[in-house]
Structure formats: structure tokens, C-alpha cells
Amino acid sequence: MRVALYAETFLPQINGIVKVLCLTLEHLQRAGIEAVVVAPKESIDTYAGARVIKVPSLRNPIYPKGRLGMPNAQTFAQIRAFAPDVMHMFHPSFSALAGQRFARKLGVPTIASFHLDLSHALNYYGSSAISSVIRRLMTWEFNRSNYALAPSTHVQQQMRNIGIRNVGLWRRGVDANKFHPRYFDPNMRDLLTDGHPEDHLLLYVGRLATEKQVHQIRAALDQIPNTRLAIVGTGALEAELKQEFAGYPVRFMGNLSGELLARAFASSDVFVFPSAFESFGLVLLEAMASGTPVVSSRVGGAPNVITEGKSGYLFDVNDTEGMITGIRRVIESPAKLAQMRIAARADAETHSWSAIMDELIECYSSVAEQSNRRALA
């Protein structure tokens, strides 16, 4: 089987979409499935045996750090030469609009997977007029595909509510070997706590952007004694957050990856995630696999992965009192925290990337087979 994947973002950029795309390519390589990636010209040349078909790109006017891919006749020639059995569009992707045209010319079935609620994000930033246009375009784009994939039951229902048909599930997972309690490191904990490892340590990992609402964690520091916060990640809001947390027991760590990130997760007491909205939130499972209980807003995949009262607690978006209550419950006693660490790890182990990627390959095969049957009918 040969698969062409379309994405608007790829390495060297690092974000949730890129992470899932890389994991997909790695699994396809292990399964002996040939793949190519259609991505903006700023991308790397190859990954996990997959060649990157680079396309001209423009700066994204909505998200200046992003690009808009512009596939052309040369792109089509390369796709035709590759002869894919399935095309997989990672939404949102401007490149996928051309990809759909290519697929129809070649008679190749398409799958579109949801990775970012762009319309919600625009609405959150006060661009409601553009948001409604993006929502209609998203519905049209997904319905042009043979099959749509949502990352969680919550998003699946949202997609159905706006008129998207044939919506299945492509859940999210975690590498439970890469993120593991064995990476607990006293030196890392000492660093994260600024030399106060005996204090309760809260952790946030992710982009520092408005919708992540990291500033809300300050209320927990105000109300829970002997509590510290470590923030891993960078973003447009970094300078503002540093000013907002000035004088608080907060350590900004910048970006961490690989074993350093695994150590940060495993060396913390509670992972706190007050985001206003998410498609899924891969960091939740990474924290849980590390044996760190999660206190998260009820967004994205959080309700699907957290067993409330056992591996973590959920609270409604903007309910800071609910967030504080959840944190208090996790750290109320060493015995409770130890128990929840075990439960968090156990819940994460049920979300194996390997099994989830096998389900994706089954989806590819099913869509390709159905397309072949229709062609022969």
C-alpha cells in the first residue's frame, strides 16, 4: 500500500500536528507501507523513509508563524508518479484543497483527519466573521473526503453537529516507554522547584498562547501553600506570562524534548491544563504515562482519558475553583498522590500508539478496498 499525506506544518516546526504526523510515518515504515508527505517548502527532506514533496508556500495571514502550501502542476506530477492508494489530509491544510482535486483526477480515495479547531480558535480571538466562513469551508472539505476521522468522541460529535458526515474515530495515544515513571530525577525536580523539592510541584507543558490560559494557574499558587509551578514551552505569550508570574514561585524552562521532557513529567506532582479548547491534548497522556496525575479543563480528549478521582480531575473551562479543588485532592496526602500516580500510569497504558496506528492502517485498507469495488462495479 502507498499513502500520500498532506499537511500544512512539518519538521523542523514542532507542534501537536507534527508530532502525530511523525508517529504516523514511523508506524507506516514499520508496517512496510510506502508514504510521501506533501508539505510547505520550508520542511525537511525526508522522515522515517518518507520523501517530502515540497510545495511553494505563503505566510499564513491568520497564523503568522504558519504557512499556506500551494501545490502545483509539478506537485501533481510527483503524486501521480508515486501512485498512492489513499490520500490522507491532516486538517487544517490549505494544501489539502489541491490534494482533493488531485485525488479526483487520479481516482484515489481520501481520508481527512481533524487536528485543530481553527474556527473555534478564530472565534476565541474575536474573529467571529472569519470563524463562520472557516467552519463552512471545513464542513465542505471534510465532506469531500471518503471518510473523516475525529481524535475524540467530543470532537466527533462537534463535527457531526456542523454537518460533517461519515465521521469515525482516530484516537490519540502515547509511547508508554518514552514517558515512564522511571524517569523521575531528583536533580530535575530540584531544577523545576528552584531548589525546593519538598514543595508541591505543578507542571504545565505546551504552547504559551492565549487560549491555553496558563495565567489561571496563578490562583492555585495563591491559595495552596508550599506549591510551585514549572512551565515548559514557549510562545507569543511568554513575556507577558513572565511579567504576570513575577514574584511567584514559578520556573520557566523553555522548550524541553526527549529524555529531558520525560524527566520533567515524571518529576512533577500534578499536571495542570486549564486550556479553553483543544482537539485532543497529547500532553495529558504523556503526563499520565509518566505517573503524574492530571487536573484538566473538560476539553478535547480529557474526558476520554482521565478517570475522575483516580487518575486525575476535570473542571469546566474557566472554573478556577474547580481547578484548585482538583489540585488539592491530588496532593491532600502522600498516600493519595502515590495511589493516583499508579492509576494515571495504568490509564495511559490503555492508549498505545501502536494499536491506534494499526486501526488507522485498517481504515486506509477499508477505504481503498471500497473505492476499488466501486471502480469495478
Image (cartoon, helix red, strand yellow):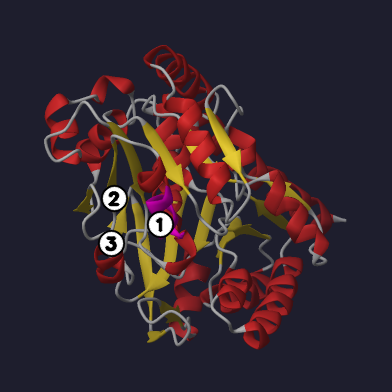
Mark 3: which amino acid? Answer: Thr
Give the residues in magenta: 213-219
Determine which of the numbered discs, if any, sits on residue 166 in the image: none
From the image, state whether disc 3 or disc 1 is nearer to you. 1
In the picture shown, does residue 88 fall above or below 195? below
Mark 2: which amino acid? Answer: Ile
Q: Which residue position is annotated with label 2?
A: 231
Q: Residue at x 33, y 25 (%)?
A: 180
Count every numbered label the image shows and give the total: 3
From the image, state whether disc 3 or disc 2 is nearer to you. 2
Is residue 76 rendered magenta in the image?
Answer: no
On the question of residue 28 being in view, the answer is no
Q: Residue at x 57, y 72 (%)?
A: 96
The secondary element bearing badge 3 is classed as loop
Q: Mostly what secondary structure, the magenta segment? A: helix
Q: Which residue position is annotated with label 1?
A: 214
In the displayed orientation, state which residue is furthest to the right: 377
The quadrant of the rendering that contains the C terminus is bottom right
Q: Position of residue 167 (x, y in %)?
A: 76, 53
Crowding around mark 2 (Cα neighbors within 10 Å: few <14, some 14 to 19, many 20+) is many
Q: Residue at x 58, y 79 (%)?
A: 98
Which comes before the other along the chain, label 3 or label 1?
Answer: 1
Q: Position of residue 310 (x, y in %)?
A: 56, 21
**Observer-nearest of 315 and 77:** 315
Q: Are marks 2 and 1 in contact (CB under 8 Å)?
A: yes
Q: Are marks 3 and 2 in contact (CB under 8 Å)?
A: no
The secondary element bearing badge 2 is classed as strand
Q: Which residue position is annotated with label 3?
A: 234
Crowding around mark 1 (Cα neighbors within 10 Å: few <14, some 14 to 19, many 20+) is many
